[in-house]
Image (spheres, rainbow, N blue to C red):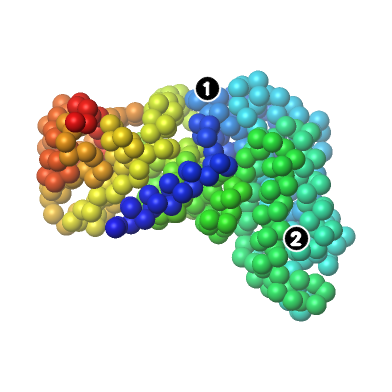
Amino acid sequence: MGLDDLASRFHRYLRSRPEHPRSPRPVVLNTWEAVYFRHDLATLAALAERGAEIGAERFVLDDGWFLGRRDDTTSLGDWTVDPAVWPDGLEPLVARVREAGMEFGLWFEPEMVNLDSELAREHPEWIFDAGHGPGLPSRHQHVLDLGHPGAYAHVLERMSALIGSLGIAYVKWDHNRYLLDAGHGPDGRPGVRDQVRQAYRLMAELKAAHPGLEIESCASGGGRVDLGVLEYADRVWPSDCNDPHERLEIQRWTGLLVPPEMQGTHIAAEETHTTHRTHPLDYRAEKALWGHLGVEVDLLGMDDETRAALARWIAFHKEHRALLHSGEVVHADLADAALRLQGVVAGDRSEALYAFSVVERPSTWPPGRVRFPGLDDERTYTVEAVHPGSPPTPAPGAVLPPWQRDGVTLPGRVLRLVGVEAPSLDVDRSVLIRVVSRTATP
């Protein structure tokens, strides 16, 4: 038994539950890294239209829509649409999103509060307090103690009213700080257990009141991703870092528990705002391919050629998402730590999709052979490199392996034990490989 087998057991269990998402996972357009707090109807409506053109199916309005929220220092807890930004409410934007053929989703951070908010000023007793006041802030925020019946009822009422009036299909439920100074007032007794149980209860009540509602557990990247929340959430957000170099490892280890269809994976800007690394679109898109795909980039500032390439990646994901979101996740054990091979293999072993990546300078040149786990030894498979975007440029001086240019047909046993010559690539580059059976199982 290895790590892939361990992950497969978790994935099979989660997929067997009656509440597991069954419909195709809609491609998400999230507004955060496109506009941050700069909200206005004209910009966001145009962004929605661009998103629909490239194939997005769900539009998520992120942080910045509620009363007084112009930056992250203020207004958490005041879940009222800001009339200064949205004089006609969110309804006009929702209508434009639906006209473009997309679902509408909205960002909340239900368990958090800024001290600079109407809620905190009216109910300071609803803030975690371990006996010395509200404690130190993190990201300018404190924890709203849902163990207080009044706090719980307030959040439930505000969220449910908006979900119902706007017909919201999806809630991005953020959670951007740890549960520290977790004292339940007025006596300061420990409050973490009650907080988590009340958060789960709140998710369950919202779903019961609004059938079909989906919830994403977005916890500053992995802060609340566990089997507990997966009973209520339809998607999790592994990390606020969309850098594909980092995401390769983040998604790999999150995937020990969470199947691909429940992991949010977004294509972001060429320069990642958290690390300031730059990567070409093809590498960013390939790394986002392996989960519940989303786009989190300024489509309005993107040139036509790049937008067209992005649309091709989205179309490729849709073409293969039935496999990506139901198959067995596999990883090859390669001799060089600079190389990675990940993939998803169909349950009946009839097809597979893999990505070979170089994450640092290999210790040998050329980098040797790559073997394909998960295939049926008794079948014959055709192996070909596929390029939804542009073919990767080989590293300087490298010779393109013949299979990468023309494809090759080999028995599954040979592909598993011998493999093929690995592509020679620069760092942070990858080749997407499709493997299709040409023979039925005996």
Position of the C terminus, as image quadrant, is top left
Q: Secondary structure at mark 1?
A: helix
Quarter of the figure with residue 308:
top left
Residue 204 vs residue 363, the one in the foreground: 204
CA distance separating discs 1 and 2 = 41 Å
Which residue is rendered at x = 70% and y = 65% of the image? 194
In percent of width and height, residue 272 lies at: 46, 47
In percent of width and height, residue 311 lies at: 44, 26
At label 1, the amino acid type is: Glu
Disc 1 + disc 2, Cβ < 8 Å: no
Quarter of the figure with residue 86:
top right
Task: Tell me if residue 48 can be seen.
Answer: yes
Dot placed on the residue nearer the N-terminal end, 1 or 2: 1
Which residue is rendered at x = 75% and y = 40% of the image? 209
Above or below, comparing residue 56 to residue 222 in the picture: above
Which residue is rendered at x = 40% and y = 41% of the image? 290
Could you say which disc has been placed on residue 273 in the image?
none
Q: Secondary structure at mark 2?
A: loop
Instruction: Assess disc 1: are there few (<14), some (14-19) or many (≥20) residues with their C-alpha within 10 Å of its C-alpha.
Output: some
Q: Which residue is mark 1?
A: 53
Residue 157 is left or right of residue 203, and the answer is right
Q: Which residue is mark 2?
A: 146
At label 2, the amino acid type is: Leu
Which residue is rendered at x = 55% and y = 24% of the image? 52
Residue 261 vs residue 390, the one in the foreground: 261
Position of the N terminus, as image quadrant, is bottom left
Q: Which dot, 1 or 2, sits closer to the camera?
A: 2
Instruction: Assess disc 2: are there few (<14), some (14-19) or many (≥20) residues with their C-alpha within 10 Å of its C-alpha.
Output: many
In percent of width and height, residue 229 lies at: 59, 54
Above or below, comparing residue 13 to residue 344 in the picture: below
